[in-house]
Image (tube, rainbow, N blue to C red):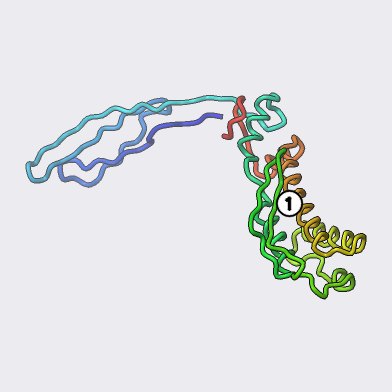
């Protein structure tokens, strides 16, 4: 692949004439002559030289990179969770079914995953297993919805404590979001992502 830096054409206004288009002299180098006219003093100035540069570098697909270059490319492309907004929306929607608000959350790949809410026992007053099983499976349409509901119903049925079941479900949800982000760092995920977006790299793993 050849990357080209430089200007292919220039325009000049020469001594009151129409704009003149200056073409590249050849495919390796060209001159640009800039003409400036001070109409008040009828002054004509010309000058300047610009040379086209060619930078030639081999191009690689992700699977062709060295392990070091793959790691660099992965760290740059996967520094955000692609499904982060959907994950948060799912967590907030699940909590919202009990009029509970998410007050803070944080997670990072290969790191911690924490979430806090304003949940109290009063949010579950009169709540029973029948109501738990009647909760919708996919309130937002995102896959995390299912995990939240399933964990909540299972733990509520097991222990009979709705608040604890809710907290367990939210903890499971934020950890699933973290694990999903971690999965983006696998070579398999990266290769699929790069193929889908037609990404190419230089030998150091820099996106071209």
Q: Nearer the viewer, residue 106 or 178?
A: 106
Q: Nearer the viewer, residue 207 or 135?
A: 135
Figure quadrant of residue 146: bottom right
Q: Residues within 10 Å of mark 1 (few under 14, many from 20)?
A: many
Residue 123's place in the image compared with 189, above or below, is below
Residue 43 is situated, as x and y percent measured from the top left of the image, at 10, 38
Residue 52's place in the image compared with 119, above or below, is above
Tell me which residue sits at (70%, 49%) in the image: 114
Tell me which residue sits at (66%, 35%) in the image: 74
Q: Nearer the viewer, residue 161 or 1?
A: 161
Q: Nearer the viewer, residue 33 or 196?
A: 196
Tell me which residue sits at (68%, 27%) in the image: 65
Residue 145 is situated, as x and y percent measured from the top left of the image, at 78, 60
Q: Kindly give the residue lying farthest to the bottom in the view shown.
A: 126
Quadrant showing the C terminus: top right
Circle 1 residue: 174
Q: How many marks?
A: 1
Q: Is residue 5 toward the left or the right of residue 192 in the image? A: left
């Amino acid at each position: 692949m050849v990357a080209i830096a430089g200007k292919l054409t220039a325009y000049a206004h020469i001594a009151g004439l129409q704009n003149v288009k200056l073409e590249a002299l050849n495919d390796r180098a060209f001159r640009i002559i800039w003409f400036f006219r001070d109409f008040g003093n009828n002054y004509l100035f010309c000058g300047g030289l610009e040379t086209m540069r060619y930078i030639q570098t081999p191009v690689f697909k992700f699977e062709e990179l060295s392990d070091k270059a793959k790691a660099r490319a992965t760290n740059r492309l996967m520094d955000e969770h692609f499904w982060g907004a959907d994950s948060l929306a799912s967590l907030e929607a699940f909590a919202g079914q009990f009029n509970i608000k998410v007050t803070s959350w944080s997670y990072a790949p290969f790191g911690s995953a924490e979430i806090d809410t304003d949940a109290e026992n009063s949010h579950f007053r009169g709540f029973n297993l029948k109501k738990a099983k009647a909760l919708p499976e996919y309130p937002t349409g995102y896959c995390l919805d299912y995990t939240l509901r399933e964990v909540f119903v299972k733990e509520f049925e097991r222990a009979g404590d709705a608040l604890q079941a809710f907290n367990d479900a939210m903890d499971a949800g934020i950890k699933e979001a973290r694990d999903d982000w971690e999965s983006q760092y696998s070579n398999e995920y990266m290769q699929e992502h790069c193929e889908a977006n037609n990404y190419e790299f230089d030998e150091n793993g820099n996106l071209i």
